[in-house]
Amino acid sequence: MRPRDLIFLKDVLVIGVTAFGGPQSHIAVFQRTLVEKRRYLTDDELMELNAMCNMLPGPSSTQTICAIALKRGGTLLAVLTLLLWMLPAVTAMTLVTVLFNTIDKRGLTLDVFRFVQPVAIALIAYSGLRIGTNVLKNHLGKGLMVFGLLATILYPQPWTFPSVLLLGGLATAFTKHEAHSLREELRMIDWHRSWVSLGLFIGVFAIAAILGAVTQYKPFVLFENCYRFGALTFGGGNVLVPMMFEQFVKYRHYLSAEEFVSGFAINQAMPGPVFAFAAFAGGRSLHSMGYSLQVLGCVLSAVAIFLPGLLSIFVVFPYWQMLKRHRATVRALEGVNAVAVGLILGSAVVLYTNLPFHWINSLVMIAAFLLLDKVKMKVPPLVLLALLGGFVYHYINTY
């Protein structure tokens, strides 16, 4: 490992602890830390990788940060990045799973986290505007940004992201303007890694399905279910959660609806990837088999849910590099990036409209935006300030 790779991994761990608010907020944190602060990549490169990941099944923000690591340092750095990125959230949900029987769920309050969401929305809006100033190069780009913004607000469906990104790319792919060459930015394409990853992707899928069907042993079934979710889920956590509810609560009766909803509420208050909820669902599914297997269920579920997303990046990345050799693809990326800015800004609007309407949420969001824009406050202290504000708010309301 090179010293600069160790610094990158340290940044990933810090992001994993402080990235609240879901995948759109995660991209905003990536832009703030990895682009603005460290300059590991440009805004254009971040939007390109995020666009690629939004067209794949799996957790898009997780795949994006792994793709950044893969482009920067290769396979080992990408694997270590995944482990450090998921570690805080998975560890927290594992602890919640083990302690769940001793938690008085009626007394459990999430008031301390109530200001994290408005802060996350402010971060999304701020980063979207910052990226837009660097990415939007002409009137067509601004128009595509508006198109992405309206599509996200009016049709917030799983298929919206990949569809509008594709349309944005087509809108600029065949324009007449000269596209800058990316040949000098490309490294040697690793086709061997792509084919090995594809074999692993299919092989693990097949072996897990056979073991689960033949043995009906709950840990094997659990691994197969979570691997399938990670391999086939488009749209991120918003689509994953109802699928898991249908499978684990309604069909297999591994845990109750009350347990599921309570665990998801806690997961929403945690930093890091939403897919870490699989650790809770997996652990609770095996709680009747003892603490050791309960912890094993958390680990198995987390590995199974994230592994397909990482392997799919390894499979697709060489083809992405190859496509970028063509000028039409370079032109298309301008449209993709412009639409992606609209998707980020639209996500901020959608998240805001889903917040409980209260003047204090709007006030916190505006204050957070001003702190980011005028004071240049970093994300970790801003999140800590939001948590402190939530604690004070809970104390005032309680006493």
Image: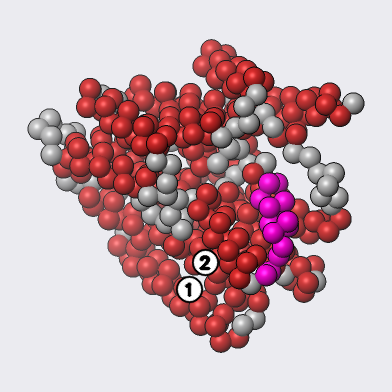
Q: CA distance from mark 2 to mark 1?
A: 9 Å
Q: Which residue is tagged 1? A: 204
Q: As drawn, is 141 to the left or to the right of 243?
A: left
Q: Who is closer to the viewer here, 89 or 224?
A: 224
Determine the residue located farthest toward the bottom in the rendered image: 214
Amino acid identity at mark 1: Val
Q: Is residue 246 above or below residue 373?
A: below
Span colored in magenta: 253-266
Report the residue at 39% width, 41% height from top. 155
**Residue position for label 2:** 227
Instruction: Return the x and y of residue 29 as percentages of the image width and height.
Output: 52, 34
User: Mark 2 and 1 residues: CB-CB less than 8 Å, in contact?
Assistant: yes
| Closer-to-camera residue (18/2) | 18
For the C terminus, the image quarter is top right
At which x and y percent is residue 259?
Answer: 73, 57
Amino acid on which disc 2 is placed: Tyr
Question: What is the number of the mark on residue 93?
Answer: none
Residue located farthest toward the top when viewing the structure as drawn = 374
Circle 2 sits in a helix, a strand or a loop, which is it?
helix
264 inside magenta stretch: yes
The rendered magenta stretch, by its main secondary structure, is classed as: helix
Determine whether, in the image, residue 63 is placed left or right of residue 6: left
